[in-house]
Each structure stands twice: as C-alpha cells, then as structure tokens.
Amino acid sequence: MIRVAKFGGSILTSGGDYLRAAEEVRKLHEHGGVIVVVSAMKGVTDKLIEAASSPGSAERIIEEVYESYSRALEEVGGAPRFSEDLYREYTNLASALWAVRVLGEVSPRARDYIVSFGERFSSIVMAAALESLGLKAVSLTGREAGIVTDDRFGEANPIYRVSRDLTRKTLLPLLGDGVVPVVTGFIGGTLDGAVTLLGRGGSDFSATLLASYLDAGEVLIYTVTGAVMSGDPRKIPYARPVDRMNFSEAAEVARLGLRKFHPRTFEPLIGSGVRVRITRVGGGSETVIDGVGGPPPVKAVTVYEDLAMVVVEGKTLPGRIGALAKAAGLLAGRGVNIVSIVQPPSETSMVFVVESGQAEEALEALEGLRREGYASNVYKEGHVSSVSVVGEGVISPGMMSRVHEIALGEGAKVVVWSPASPSISVLVEPRLTWKVANLLHDEVVLGG
C-alpha cells in the first residue's frame, strides 16, 4: 500500500524535528512505498512574502531563512550534494529578488516563484534526513513530481487528468526502486513550467492530490496537536479529540477555520477509499477521516471572527431577475470574498457577510446597485462573528431546534444553514462569540 505522509511547518523547526519526522517515515517505509510532502519551516512563508514586497530588506530576510535551513541540514547530516542543492536554490532565490528590485514591481508569477523557496529548502533537508537514516530519497518540487495547474497564480487549480498521468509516470518508478520521493507541498506548475502556488495551507491539498493520483491507501497529516478537537481548546475548556469524521464534515471544519487545512484538502478524496489520519509524530490521539465517518453525530463547534454584514435594501428588488448576480459581480470585481448571503423570501433585501477588512470595499462596490436603480439603500449593519456547529447529525429536526433555541436565546442575529452542508451557523455580536460557542459546544456537541 502506498502512503502519503505530510509534515507541516509547525513541526519542522530544527534539524532534530526533521530527523524525528524521517524516523517516522522509516517505520512507514518498512510496510510499503511512502511519498513525503513537506511544508516550509514555521514562519518562513511569511518571511518570503515580506522579502518579495520589501526589496530593501530582502537580502537580510533571505540570509536568515537560508541560515536556518543550513543549520538544520548540518544537524541531520547527509551527503555534501544536499548542501550544494541548498546553496543553488538560495542563489536562485537571490537572483529572483534582485530582478524584482530592478524592475520595481512583483508580478503574481514572480511572487509565487519567490514564496515557493521555503518548501524547496525544506524538501532538501528532509531528503538529507532520510538518507542519514539509510533510506534512498530524492527531493522534487510539486511540478517536478507532476502536479500541473492553470496559471491562476496564488490560488492555482490542478489539472486533474494531466497531473494524474505525470505523477504516476514520475513517482511510481521511484517507489518501485525503493526511493522515497520528498515533494514540496503548496507548489505546482503550469504546462510551460511556471511555478504556481495552491494557496495558504496548500501542502495538505498537495498530499491528498498525490494520494488521489496514485491510488494511495492512506494519507497521514502530522501536526503538533494531533487529533482534530471539537472546539478551540484555548477558548472552549471542554473541547475533546474527535475520533472519526467523514470527508464532508472535515471539509466543513476546514472551510470554517477550526483547523488550518486548505479548504480543498479533502476534495480529491471524495468517493475514494483513501483514509486520512490527522496525527502526531510518535503517536497519540488522532482523527481518522474517510468516506464513512462515525459517531458522534455532531462533531465540533467552529468560530469565524472579524466579519461584517453589508445590507442592500430596495422596493424594486422583489422579482428583479439578476439582482443577486449583479451584486455578486460587483463584489467579485473588487476582489471581495462573500462568506455568506442571506435573503428573505420577500426579496426586499440582501445581506452579504464579508470579512471586516473588506467591508468598506464591499460597501463601495454595492453602491453601484443604488446608482443603477436596483436598491434604495446600502449600508453596513455592523461587525459579527460566525459560530458553526458541524456534523451530519446537526441538520436533523431535533438538533436544529436545539441550536436555534440556544443561539436565539443568546441574541444571535441570523441562523444560516443548507441541506447540502453538514453545519448550522449563527451570526452573533463579537462580544457574544465565545459565550455562544461554549454553550453550543457543551449543550449540542457534548450533549448530542
């Protein structure tokens, strides 16, 4: 059975961390082929973003990044070629930043290339750690491994059929020879070779894409905390590990922010027999995610803070075909992400929930509806948080009634749900966020 093992940046902070991860891979390798997917060291991606946007401090930043990886490489040992590989990538990064400084601007394509180096460095150190334990390893970028995407830089979309053929052609022979491919997470590439990024958290997505392409049996996602918790333990004292989830529940948890999975992490595995384990290096509590899931029927409470409601009102809205599409188009044109839309059956208003930082932009964009006669009033209602209860059982009449009763009793503004999603969300004033979250967790998740 092929396994894909993904190691996040939060557990890769030193050479010792890479060696512990490599030891985990060595154990897995005893039972079949393993593909390793790595993130950048914790904090490195943010530093590279800063370097790309701050030419004056770029040299200092990338020297710090290079030194941190060099120290880790010294700690893990390995053949001299890994030091040469690391230095070559460093000079490539320095050259890219020099070009940006000369041009005076960073194109989306250049930005993706620069930000990709955290994972490039990381894959070299991990390959060295594996070889120091006696395994054969090779480091590859996501594109070298075969992940081909469109050219939507920053948030690229994989091209499934092409990627499946290329990854199988590249990786299966390596596995057959007993080699451990170490693939950069987060990174893909266009057909003509331009580097693209899959979006923040994209290493999880890389791992599940590879598992899907190669018909792997299992994906292991290693994190600091291991199992997915039923709530944020820093704010919800009685949060507990969730033993099992299905892909729909896990995708909902990812989109709603309880765990920092890429929102598309589980998409490639829907309908497959692949199992995902969220676990820790060395073992401990873990969450198993597959197409079946398991009890309890309600899994977790998630919180999405720093939101705002922008309201569009108008007597001419009812029956006005295309009004909602027009509004969505105006927001998309300004790059505003719509978190949620609420519209009463009377069609007399539309409420758009957006991130607080984009509220003013949304307000200006939606003023276009008033100017064109679609609406008589456009205004910002205020800041809110979204508190969501996740689990296949939450949309049963009994559970929905309990969520409504608790949330509305605490002053929730709006209740949002869809029969297509295993969650119910309530919008509350920021000051009530964690009170409502704790009540819903203790009464519905633990009480369910």
Image (cartoon, rainbow, N blue to C red):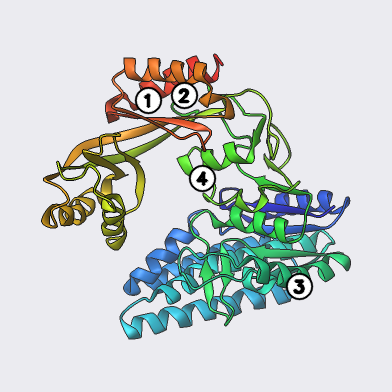
User: Circle 4 sits on which residue?
Assistant: 260
Q: Earlier in the sequence, mark 1 or mark 4?
A: 4
Front residue of 177/199: it is 199
Quadrant assignment, res 85: bottom right
User: Circle 3 sits on which residue?
Assistant: 170
Q: Residues within 10 Å of mark 3 (few under 14, many from 20)?
A: some
Q: Residues within 10 Å of mark 2 (few under 14, many from 20)?
A: some
Residue 358 placement, left or right of 227: left
Q: Report whether residue 133 is seen.
A: yes
User: Circle 1 sits on which residue?
Assistant: 434
> Which image quarter holds the C terminus?
top right
Q: Does 197 sit above or below residue 403?
A: below
| Disc 1/disc 4 C-alpha distance (Å) | 19 Å
| Marks 2 and 4 in Cβ contact (< 8 Å) | no
Labelled disc at residue 236: 2
Give coordinates of residue 37: x percent, y percent: 67, 58
**Marks 3 and 4: which is nearer the front?**
3
Q: Earlier in the sequence, mark 3 or mark 1?
A: 3
Residue type highlighted by circle 1: Trp
Q: Does 366 sit above or below residue 177?
A: above
Give coordinates of residue 148: x percent, y percent: 61, 71
Residue type highlighted by circle 3: Thr
